[in-house]
Amino acid sequence: MPLPLQSEYERIVKNSERLFKQVNRANQAEYAALLKYVRMEIADVYAKYAVAGTLTYAEMQKYNRIKNLKSAIDGIVKDRIATVKTQTQQTLITNAKASYAASAEAIGTIAEVEIPTRLSADAVTAILQKPSEGWTYAERMALRTRDLAVRLQGTVTNAFVREDSLQNVSKALKSVAEKDFIKTRAYVGDTMHRESQDAVKESIIDADESTPADIMVVKTWVTAGDQEVRDAHALLDGQTVRGDEMFVIPSGEFAGYQADAPQGFGEPALDYGCRCRVIADVVKR
């Protein structure tokens, strides 16, 4: 049986997904530009130093050529991924604020009280800085930046050792960039959902403080309802607790694991790719 506010909270999820699609397109454009400029750097060194279309590692070792090329690649990656980080962070903030406001408004409507819908700056910061699998958003993006630069540099170096053609180097660079974008897309999608649900959780806790003493705001765990739902999450489906309480897996391999919202267990096997959500309701104390 659908929960009273289920449609309102489904709209929160859909809005988060819409924002993700927007930032994903913007991030994809940055990755395309990154690949374009790295390829231009490679094409330039081939034009200058290749003989009969072949460029050797020995040739690139002369006069710090390979060092300078690696530095150029590093600069391109840092510039482009910095933009990815910034535009993603701005979207994460918009997402958190919108999720909080929509949840607070829904609770206020059913409780018939006026509830503040603005997420505080401190709460936004806390959500953004909350670690996921041991890493904050800023730390994860810094790691992604360094990893991509190293793999692009390594791809180019290996190509020189093999004396690959420019065409083959270009293909290899495309493969590296595309694989990295897929990883970034998955991470951003996960982070968007987690931070939206964290904002919803905060709205439920805050709303409970704004409602009359005889009313309690609760939250219910709801899965995506398909065959891809983890067994542990299926066990949580329909579990209802107070806004400030933890959901607890009742049995199975992960019995006893607790989370205050989806992707909040601190266990990759339970958090990664989770599509569950929480839905608020009000009950008499």
Image (cartoon, rainbow, N blue to C red):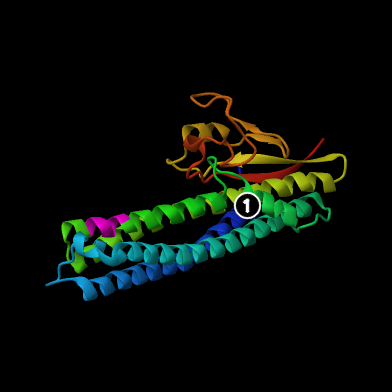
Q: Indicate the quadrant containing the C terminus: top left, top right, bottom left or bottom right.
A: top right
Residue 62 placement: quadrant: bottom left
Q: Is residue 215 left or right of residue 59?
A: right
Stretch of the chain drawn in magenta: 154-159
Give the residue pinned by disc 1: 128
Does the magenta-highlighted stretch encompass residue 221?
Answer: no
Q: Residue at x 71, y 58 (%)?
A: 101
Q: Which residue is drawn at 39% across and 56% down?
A: 148
Q: Position of residue 196 (x, y in %)?
A: 61, 52
Does the magenta-highlighted stretch encompass residue 155?
Answer: yes
Residue type pointed to by label 1? Leu
Q: Position of residue 210 (x, y in %)?
A: 84, 48
Numbered circles on residues, count: 1
Residue 213 placement: quadrant: top right
Q: Is residue 159 left or right of residue 133?
A: left
In the picture as drawn, the residue positioned furthest to the right comes out as 213
Q: Is residue 23 visible?
A: no
Residue 117 placement: quadrant: bottom right
